[in-house]
Image (spheres, rainbow, N blue to C red):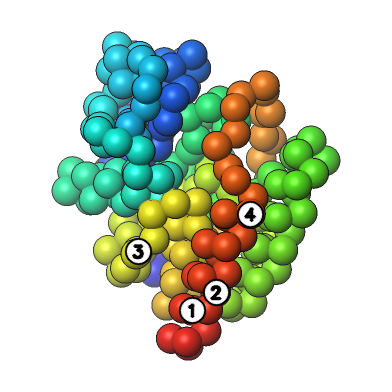
Amino acid sequence: MAGELNEGMHCGVVIPAFNTASIIGEVVERVQRHTPRVLVVDDGSCDRTYWEANNAGATVLRHHENRGKGRALRTGFAWALEQGWDPVITLDSDGQHDPAEIPRFLKCYARQAADIVLGVRILSYHRMPPHRRANNRLISAVGSWLSGQKIPDFQTGYRLIRAEVLRSVQLTTERYETEAELLIKAGRLGFHIAMIPIRAIYRNEISYVKPLREMRLFTCLLIRSLIRS
């Protein structure tokens, strides 16, 4: 289950977005320095996210109502597979992830024969808001146990995924727990998950993560995972 970095690689980037009109154009333009294949999934934004992403040169798919980050990712994955993208990189639309890191993901993908490469926010962990840091620590501990692989940052949205993983893993969730669901199911199927340290850029952006709801959704995912194990 290994990928190789070569001239024939058809890598593309999927960006789920919700109300990030002020930054999404810049994010798209910076991603395009590394690949022309950029898809933004506008998850029912109330601002100009769709138009800013489109004007920056991205392909844009639009949910007419907010359906959750997980559903936006699933929409993006389905479209990327139809286009033959392999591997698929995901990053957040709020500027937290530096597109200049993309070549590092591709090098790790090739050198470590990885099926998934995660950008672990070790370099900026101390800057993560305290409630999110505690939440991430708990989810990462439980998620690592369920997936069978040690993963210190289970919730990172910056990741590279082989197309075979996306074809093999059946995703059913729709919100922030989808990223955890992918890792749990991929780990159980025996896919190799590698990691690289990344720097996270925390601005004054509005966070749509609700810790209590996130923990409830992850708990439901945990219970389903245990029942099916």
Residue 100 locus on image (x, y percent): 55, 27
Near mark 2 (Cα within 10 A), the count class, few <14, some 14-19 or many ≥20, is: some
Query: How far apart are labels 3 and 2 at the CA level?
Result: 14 Å
At mark 1, the secondary structure is: helix
User: What residue is disc 2 on?
Assistant: 222
User: What residue is disc 3 on?
Assistant: 171
Residue lying at the far right in this picture: please name it. Answer: 126
Amino acid type shown at disc 2: Leu
Residue 28 locus on image (x, y percent): 41, 22
Q: Do the residues labelled 3 and 2 touch (CB within 8 Å)?
A: no
User: What residue is disc 4 on?
Assistant: 212
Residue lying at the far left in this picture: please name it. Answer: 82
User: Does residue 208 appear to the left or right of 34 in the view shown?
Assistant: right
Near mark 3 (Cα within 10 A), the count class, few <14, some 14-19 or many ≥20, is: some
User: What residue is disc 1 on?
Assistant: 225
Residue 104 locus on image (x, y percent): 56, 40
At mark 3, the secondary structure is: loop
Query: How far apart are labels 1 and 4 at the CA level?
Result: 20 Å
> Mark 1 or 4 closer to N-term?
4
Q: Which of marks 1 and 4 is in front?
A: 4
